[in-house]
Image (spheres, rainbow, N blue to C red):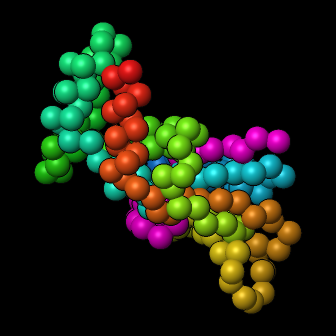
Amino acid sequence: MRDVVIMGGAFRVPGNITPAAEANIWGDPLAADIVFGADWPVVAVPLDLTTRTFMDSAVLADLGARGGAGMQLVADLSQGYVGFYQAAGYDGMLVHDCTAAVYLTDPDLFTVVQGEVRVLSDGIALGLTLMNPADRQGPLGAWEGRPRQSATLDGQPDAILARIAQVCTA
């Protein structure tokens, strides 16, 4: 059986769509809770790490120039996203999905924790991802019978960005 790798969740950091939720999980929190409760291994690559994988505009422009026509197209299409971050005072963009893709090729760049995961599907915290860590002592309650899943709450952002650059210019 293979892992399901998703870019989603915000376990120990604020969300990016609400204070509680990351956008992908918030879009369908009930489905996310079902996925985390399914009988297959899930690895979440959440905002906890992806908000630390920031590609500045100069690096993006360089990758576009060195990566051929396809990468130049990606760099050009990313300008709206870069503009979103520039409006907030940043010169570049977060590479959420690319970070999750790097997990597939270089899992050694990520620190993985395990536990049962629940996603709230109503109320003020709609879309909140909660993990009951594997080493936690105490009653399971709403986590009872759930499989242990994984989340990359930490990792090596500089090495992840270097791997993205390597792939984009290969």
- Rendered view: 144 above or below 80: below
Residue 2 visible (yes or no): yes
Q: Residue at x 72, y 44 (%)?
A: 3
Tell which of 134 and 19 is nearer to you.
134
Q: Residue at x 45, y 58 (%)?
A: 155
Q: Position of residue 150 (x, y in %)?
A: 65, 59
Q: Residue at x 54, y 52 (%)?
A: 108
Tell which of 148 and 8 is nearer to you.
148
- Rendered view: 128 above or below 159: below
| Side (left or right) of 84 relative to 128 | left
Single out the residue that lies furthest toward the bottom: 138
Does the magenta portion include 15?
yes
Residue 73 position by quadrant = top left
Q: Position of residue 149 (x, y in %)?
A: 71, 60
Residue 80 visible (yes or no): no
| Side (left or right) of 17 relative to 76 | right
- Rendered view: 44 above or below 120: above
Q: Position of residue 28 (x, y in %)?
A: 61, 47
Does the magenta portion include 102?
no
| Side (left or right) of 61 relative to 97 | left
Extent of the magenta region: 1-20
- Rendered view: 13 above or below 60: below
Tell which of 120 and 61 is nearer to you.
61
Residue 168 position by quadrant = top left
